[in-house]
Image: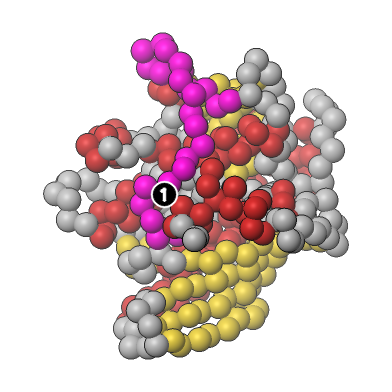
Amino acid sequence: MIRREDGAGGKYMTEFLRKRIFSRLDSRAGEISLSDMEDSADFDEKYVFTTDSYTAFPPIFRGGSIGSLAVCGTSNDLAVMGAQPAYMSLALIIQEGFDEGTFERIMDDVRHWSERIGVKVITGDTKVVEMNAGIFVNTSGIGVRNEALENNLRVLREYRDYPYRWVRDRGLKAGDAVIVTGNIAEHGLAMLLEREDLGFEVDVESDVQPVWFAVKAAMEVGGVSAMKDPTRGGVAEALNEMAEKSGVGILVEEERIPVRDDVKGVCDALGLDPLTMANEGKVVMGVEGEMAEDVLRVLRKFDESAEIIGYATDEFREVVVKTRIGTTKILPWPTIDPIPRVC
């Protein structure tokens, strides 16, 4: 029996993919294979390709809509490979009787963000179904090589042998700084508060936005070795995946993790861990240690809350958090989705 946890990011989803899918399908068109579980895969040396399906409920929420998620989320999967988002498909599954005004708002967000990012929606599909579906959106995207990526790889290779043609989530090396590009947990919490009247007076909206412009600026400085957008499973998922694939450990300082006090307060009251909550406009980024402060300085022009939260290390292979009181604890892979249907 397939469980909700099998599609929620984290440990169970990884196990499900390896057992049920990669045992039957595992091909490649370039250096990245299906079983590498990267955010995108490359082909024809110049392009990366990604696809994603969005089931967010409600479809319009604080700070965005399922249309915002689809365009920004797919472009972000391309951007964290170092690729410039260029082309996109849009497929819609809509419940019969779905509100026209809500649908037009979603499509307005699709238009706004595709124009803002500079990505062209060039193909698509629409189905209307007789079921309690609401609306589901699938987007696929193609990203292209660019001068910022080439500069980043050139700078990085001045410090080490980097064998990849794209920025890979397995590119960390001991001594690399780990940066989070802004405050975390806001998308997941905004979605929860949109659904439930929990009595909290907190002004929080989804962080859904394109990361390409910040990523491009970071690569123009150079030295970015690994990237992941912390959506399902949050920062905890991204850190564990990057550490395992890179064969290193990551030491994180709890007090340096950027999270708003009011967001953390609500999470604490509800028993939620901000590190496992979905984000839709942030990047977990590995950067060559000597370049980290320069990259951080540029990232803070886009978001002042960007922070170096720790470093990769060869001393262990886990993700370890140094707490505010000086103790350490292992940050495990997430196993369940604390707030389902947020992306």
Region of the chain picked out in magenta, as a range: 318-343
Residue at figure coordinates x 39%, y 88% from the top left: 130
Residue 336 included in the magenta stretch of the image: yes
Dominant secondary structure, magenta: loop
Q: Is residue 324 left or right of residue 72?
A: left
Q: Is residue 213 visible?
A: no
The residue furthest top is 326
Mark 1 Cα within 10 Å, few/some/many (few <14, many 20+)? many
Residue at figure coordinates x 59%, y 60% from the top left: 75
Residue 227 included in the magenta stretch of the image: no
- Counting from the top left corner in percent of width and height, residue 121 is at 61, 75
Residue at figure coordinates x 50%, y 86% from the top left: 127
Residue at figure coordinates x 46%, y 52% from the top left: 5
Figure check: 150 above or below 60 = above
In the rendered image, which residue does mark 1 sit on?
337
The residue furthest left is 199
- Counting from the top left corner in percent of width and height, residue 69 is at 47, 62
- Counting from the top left corner in percent of width and height, residue 168 is at 72, 43
Q: Nearer the viewer, residue 277 or 285?
A: 277
The residue furthest front is 1
Q: Nearer the viewer, residue 334 or 19?
A: 19
Q: Is residue 53 visible?
A: yes
Q: Is residue 264 left or right of residue 319?
A: left
Counting labels gives 1
- Counting from the top left corner in percent of width and height, residue 31 is at 83, 51
